[in-house]
Image: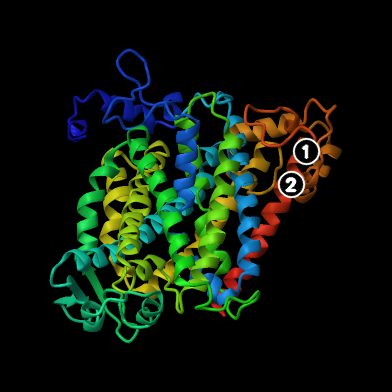
Amino acid sequence: MSGFWHSDHPRRSEYRQLKDPSNEASFVSYRDNEGRPDTSRGGLLGGKSLGFFSSIVIVVNNIAGPGMLVLPKVYQDAGWFVPTVVLFVICIASSLAAILLTDAMARVPGNSRFQRRIEFVNVFEEFWGHRGMQLAQGMFIVNMMAQISSSIISNAQVMDSFIVFLNPRHTTYALQVWPTLDIISWSPPLKAILQPPVTMEQSAACHQGKVIPFNDPEESRAIISLGYLSLALILIPMSIMNLEENIFIQKISFYMLLLLSAEFLMQFYMQGMGNHEVPAFGHDYSHVLGSIVFNFAFIVVVPSWVNEKKAEVGIAPSIWISTFFSTILYVATGWMGAMAYYRAEGNFLNTLSNACSPTITRVSAFLFAFGMIGLGIPFICIVTRYSLLVGRVCGPRMSHFWAIFFPWLVSWVFYEGGLFNELIAWSGDLALGPINFVFPLLIALAAVGVRGMVPSSWLPPHQVELHSSELGTAQEQEQDTSCFLQALKVADPEDAHDKVNLETVVQPFPSFLHRFYRPIATFFAILLSVLIVFSIASHSH
């Protein structure tokens, strides 16, 4: 990549075209000297090379992220009924939001078969104008930074346990930044080292002690651990790839998810399902929605996948299969993990990887942390870089800085376990929920003709002209003022002017439901908005 910065590099002129919003190239993949998409190693963007299995891998890997690690604690606090119901509701809602977002992409002029390079924020620019794009871009960046930071922290904590596991002295180290500058060390309790648990009963008793590196609720400090620095050295180089180059790593991550999840579920069963009673209804629901929304916050990466999938890969089947598989895995992990341990940590890999767990479980936790969640960090960085670059927020140099290096410069602040829990819950409520669920549904409604969701001054000129041409009489203009009534309108199959009847290659609904496109999208947008407000109020209380 270093050669790109030279002024005579061939892709410099391509990037100058990309920066020009009036240029068609601003939405098209980079080209080589013969006009073909530039998909060579080191290219800024990838080509259309992802098949059906690769698509499943990408979607599942982006769902099964660090939010998965807080589910056992959520089930312990809230009981099994509410989290399970919310998981399936969010599963359906996230699938619809992702599919309808791609339908809106296909309604962008000249992109009926995804031949243009349309990233997440470009959809908002098309239907809500430049200010709408800026709003989406801001929330998108917060969303991606929250996901990157949470993945970094959950991995760094387990990496420190791995260093303890490998080090004959059973010690790891950290630079303490606050309240005093110092080099500190941590070792597990001497009893856990000299007399490691050999039975499940001893393991359950051991977990009640202080066995997680640098995680002491009685101390308040900011540290940069050896595990954190080691992880940065490994993962930052992988984040400079493009998406198609990264797919081999994603497949390895997917296979590890299947294998290691099976091992964890077996460990839960062997640990015993009676160590902690999980009632139907619990005492604390404040983290339920935020944590579960965090788990399904994959919608913002869908446009990047669509841009690089093969034409024959079906969007709806890929998404529905991925989300339902992930939901079943979530329910099993949360419920069984809550019953198997006396006290579930916010980062559940800390529980599985510490000195109180059997060796095979510890090794599995280390592999899961790095192979599943750790290898997902480069993917999120790549997608963030794509959006910053194609969205014309910054150039190649700064897009690399903000998407790859900046998260590592700040994420250490959230290393303490309590801050990790709050990061996931609050970012799920305030940023990930709206930008992954509500906004995609609203932009899908805008793409099929619903007006009034944003001020008319935001709309790009071609959308204003199109809207004016669709309104004939003053009476029609008066009837058009109710955004809510437009959003509830069922399409008349005989109305050739209704945009819902102009079906795209996405085909988001079965034929018998397609006329209810707008009411279905509106229902879920309202439902999710209400749930998010309720979750924020509950969490604040």
CA distance separating discs 1 and 2: 9 Å
Q: Is residue 86 visible?
A: yes
Q: Is 360 displayed left or right of 478 in the figure?
A: left
- Amino acid carrying label 1: it is Leu
* Residue 51 percent across, percent down from the top left: 47, 29
Q: Is residue 453 above or below residue 541?
A: above
Quadrant of the frame with the N terminus: top left
* Residue 299 percent across, percent down from the top left: 53, 46
* Residue 295 percent across, percent down from the top left: 50, 57
**Residue where numbered disc 2 is placed:** 520
Mark nearest the camera among 1 and 2 is 1
Q: Is 295 displayed left or right of 32 in the figure?
A: right
Q: Residues within 10 Å of mark 2 (few under 14, many from 20)?
A: some
Q: Is residue 472 above or below residue 450?
A: above
Q: Is residue 120 visible?
A: no
Q: Is 173 displayed left or right of 430 in the figure?
A: left
Picture residue at 30% right of the left edge, 59% below the top: 363
- Amino acid carrying label 2: it is Ile
Label of residue 297 in the image:
none
Q: Is disc 1 in contact with disc 2, using a CB cutoff of under 8 Å?
A: yes
Picture residue at 54% right of the left edge, 24% below the top: 312
**Residue where numbered disc 1 is placed:** 513
Q: Residues within 10 Å of mark 1 (few under 14, many from 20)?
A: few
Q: Is residue 5 above or below residue 454?
A: above
Picture residue at 27% right of the left edge, 48% below the top: 401
